[in-house]
Amino acid sequence: SQQGEEDPQALSIQEGENATMNCSYKTSINNLQWYRQNSGRGLVHLILIRSNEREKHSGRLRVTLDTSKKSSSLLITASRAADTASYFCASHSNYQLIWGAGTKLIIKP
Amino acid sequence: GAVVSQHPSRVICKSGTSVKIECRSLDFQATTMFWYRQFPKQSLMLMATSNEGSKATYEQGVEKDKFLINHASLTLSTLTVTSAHPEDSSFYICSASLTVTGNTIYFGEGSWLTVV
């Protein structure tokens, strides 16, 4: 199956800084979702942005969507050590989720 | 909110045996459930789409005779790994679609399978 692409693959920043992750996809979508996964755990749904939306906020999270470029970004502001995890984007088209490879985010205290 | 329960969370089995993993939607009816597997340090790979009352749709490269999927009711889908081999050891995750259009998808906690 197809896979989207995320960059960077790994990101290490100091606590308090902002973290930005990007995701690109290849087909037209219904929506795009961002998930977080702590090591060895299941996925936690963070935020969903629909194809007709351009920006969405949830707490310290800000997601943008550019359907013309087929890309999305996830911004985590004022990062905390507890934000250390892998973050995945998934583009949703009909009954399929097409996943990015994920970004491993490390927040240094 | 909607919850998807997966069982067992961890299972160890011997080579050659079969293992069944259950995925239940606890407070909603899911016409569609998805099964994924995740290798260490890799992203999720969609294995199959499970449709209630009909045959599952498998992704290219996934052996349907090895990974048997049954979606017998609107709240339960099962994945059976038959004649398991050590290379089948992986993290298996199911998800269920809440709405007809599938715009909201909820995930189970995943099942660690180790084949020895």
Image (tube, rainbow, N blue to C red):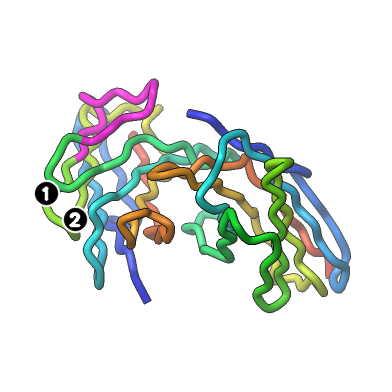
Disc 2 marks which amino acid? Leu
Pinpoint residue B56: horizontal percent, then vertical percent: 23, 36
Q: Which residues are magenta?
A: B56-69
Q: Residue at x 33, y 62 (%)?
A: B98
Q: Quadrant of the N terminus of chain B?
A: bottom left
Q: In front: A26, or B33?
A: A26
Q: Name the residue: 55% across, 40% down.
A: B40
Residue A9: x, y in percent? 74, 42
Q: Cα distance, mark 1 to mark 2?
A: 7 Å
Q: Name the side, left or right, on which A60 lies relative to B25.
A: right
Between A71 and B87, the one nearer to me in the picture: A71
Read off the residue under disc 1.
B72
Q: Amino acid at mark 1?
A: Ala
Q: Is residue B61 magenta?
A: yes
Q: Secondary structure at mark 2?
A: strand
Horizontal side, residue B2 vs residue A16: left or right: left
Which residue lies under the disc numbered 2? B76
On what subunit does the disc labeled 1 rest?
B
- Magenta stretch: dominant secondary structure: loop
